[in-house]
Structure formats: structure tokens, C-alpha cells
């Protein structure tokens, strides 16, 4: 299971939003590049970068920032405000290894198929961010009318492999990750699910790993950690070790 430290960028600053609410913003750094170096030094193989300007303001992301982040070393999983396949290609060309598609493909599912055909399933993650059983869109401000499982099954049938599942009510709250629903989504769709929202302790990371090991269909492929890292509640190096599970003892 991969640990994805999160770098959410708004106005050039590294921030965290509680339950996706732009009015409940905490700023952690003025320098996303420095933060990425910190996560690399702690052992990160991937970094989860969110363009909050695109999610809320329909603003263009500074691709130079993405290029700088990509040069640091860890692979970049990038999401927020992507509007079409051309923009997906631009982000991948700028150095991202994978893009997260949310509102765009929930509203226009055929674009998921276009993206899969254009860049392949390894480069695509579909965001299934839920509140009260409904997938949320437009920066988590509107209900889509779909449940995560319904949408997940639909996208899986198209050939999507990865889904990012966020329990919106837990995001940024340090109340614990929703292990049961994450596992259910993987089991009922066959998707490789990346969990997000609410990670507060190393026990949350371990619970996800253990739940994933018991699945016969789908997987819990990763976990995104944000506020817990920035507050110091979770150490990234330790989280990576816990996510990897017990290692065989060399004789």
C-alpha cells in the first residue's frame, strides 16, 4: 500500500481545507517545492498534488510549479480543475504520472473513456468523493445523484483501474479514516482504491492495510495523508513503513 503525502495548493501556498470548505483553510507553507523536498527526504515515492485554484476558481494551474515538483523525484498524482483530454495531456507532459478526474467525468462520463484511450489506465484515477452516500462534485459543493459504488462500477466497466475515495465529512478533521466504506467500494467494484480523508494516526494506516489484505476483489492500493502530516500527528517515514507491512527477517 502506497502512502501519498498531500500538497494542496491555493494561491501558491500549501493549505488544507476542513471538509473541503474554502472558508476553513489552514495555511502550512508558502513554498510547495520545499514541502515536496521534505516529503521526498522522508521516503515518499508519490506525492498527491491538488490544484485548489482549479477546483474552486476555474483558474489555470501554473504548470511551471508542476514541472518543478516533478523534477524533485517522487511521482506526482495531480488533480483539480482539469476540463478536457487536452488539459490531461498537458499535465502529464509537464511531469505528472497520474491525473485525478472528478467533476469532469462524473458530469461527462464519456470523457473518462476518451482519457483512457488517450493516456491509458495507469495514468487515470477517478475521484469518488462522498458525503451522506452521494458522490460530490464542484469542489465538494454539489451532490451528483450517484453513490460511490454505482459510479465505481460504471467506471470499472469502462476500464478504469484506480479510484480515489474520500469521506468528505472526515477530510481534514483527524477523526479517523473510513476503513469499512473504503473496503466495501473496492470489494463491490473491483477497483484499486486509494483512501483519503480523516487519517489521524498510524493505526488508521495499519487498519487500511489489514482491510486490504482481506479483499478477494479490488484492493486498497494507497492512502492520502494531509493534515496529520502537517500537524505532526503522523510521521511520514513511519507511515510508509506501516503501509508496507511486516518485513521478513533476514537470517
Image (cartoon, rainbow, N blue to C red):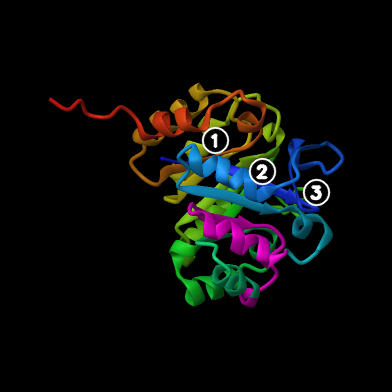
- Residue picked out by circle 1: 181
- Residue picked out by circle 2: 130
- Residue picked out by circle 3: 141
Q: Quadrant of residue 181?
A: top right
Q: Residue furthest left?
A: 251
| Vertical arrangement, residue 117 with respect to residue 204, above or below | below
First-in-chain label (3 vs 2): 2
Quadrant containing the C terminus is top left
Q: Are marks 1 and 2 in contact (CB under 8 Å)?
A: yes
Question: How dense is the environment of label 1, judged by Cα within 10 Å: few (below 14), some, or many (20 and up)?
Answer: some
Q: Residue at the location (48% across, 66% down)? A: 158
Q: CA distance from mark 3 to mark 2?
A: 11 Å
Image location of residue 194, percent across then percent down: 51, 45
Q: Residue furthest right?
A: 23
In the rendered structure, does residue 83 fall within the stretch colored magenta? yes
Query: For the magenta stretch, what is the residue range?
Result: 62-86
First-in-chain label (1 vs 3): 3
| Vertical arrangement, residue 88 with respect to residue 5, above or below | below
In the rendered structure, does residue 55 fall within the stretch colored magenta? no
Q: Quadrant of residue 21?
A: top right
Image location of residue 115, percent across then percent down: 55, 72
Question: How dense is the environment of label 3, judged by Cα within 10 Å: few (below 14), some, or many (20 and up)?
Answer: few
Q: CA distance from mark 1 to mark 3?
A: 21 Å
Question: How dense is the environment of label 2, judged by Cα within 10 Å: few (below 14), some, or many (20 and up)?
Answer: many
Image location of residue 76, percent across then percent down: 54, 56
Left or right: 27 with respect to 100?
Answer: right
Amino acid at each position: 500500500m502506497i502512502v501519498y503525502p498531500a500538497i494542496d495548493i491555493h494561491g501558491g501556498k500549501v493549505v488544507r481545507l476542513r471538509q473541503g470548505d474554502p472558508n476553513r483553510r489552514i495555511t502550512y507553507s508558502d513554498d510547495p517545492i520545499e514541502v515536496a523536498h521534505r516529503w521526498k527526504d522522508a521516503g515518499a515515492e508519490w506525492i498527491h498534488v491538488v490544484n485548489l485554484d482549479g477546483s474552486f476558481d476555474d483558474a489555470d494551474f501554473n504548470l511551471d510549479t508542476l514541472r518543478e515538483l516533478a523534477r524533485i523525484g517522487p511521482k506526482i498524482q495531480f488533480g483539480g480543475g482539469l476540463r478536457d483530454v487536452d488539459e490531461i495531456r498537458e499535465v502529464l507532459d509537464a511531469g505528472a504520472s497520474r491525473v485525478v478526474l472528478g467533476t469532469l467525468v462524473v458530469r461527462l462520463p464519456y470523457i473518462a473513456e476518451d482519457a483512457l484511450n488517450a493516456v491509458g489506465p495507469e495514468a487515470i484515477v477517478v475521484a469518488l468523493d462522498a458525503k451522506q452516500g452521494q458522490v460530490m462534485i464542484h469542489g465538494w459543493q454539489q451532490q451528483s445523484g450517484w453513490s460511490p459504488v454505482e459510479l465505481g462500477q460504471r467506471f470499472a466497466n469502462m476500464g478504469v483501474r484506480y479510484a480515489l475515495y474520500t469521506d468528505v465529512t472526515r477530510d481534514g478533521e483527524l477523526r479517523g479514516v473510513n476503513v469499512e466504506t473504503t473496503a466495501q467500494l473496492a470489494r463491490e467494484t473491483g477497483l484499486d482504491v486509494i483512501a483519503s480523508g480523516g487519517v489521524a494516526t498510524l493505526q488508521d494506516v495499519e487498519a487500511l492495510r489489514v482491510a486490504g489484505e482481506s479483499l478477494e476483489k479490488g484492493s486498497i492500493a494507497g492512502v492520502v495523508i494531509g493534515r496529520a502530516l502537517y500537524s505532526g500527528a503522523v510521521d511520514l517515514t513511519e507511515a510508509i513503513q506501516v503501509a508496507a507491512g511486516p518485513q521478513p527477517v533476514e537470517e
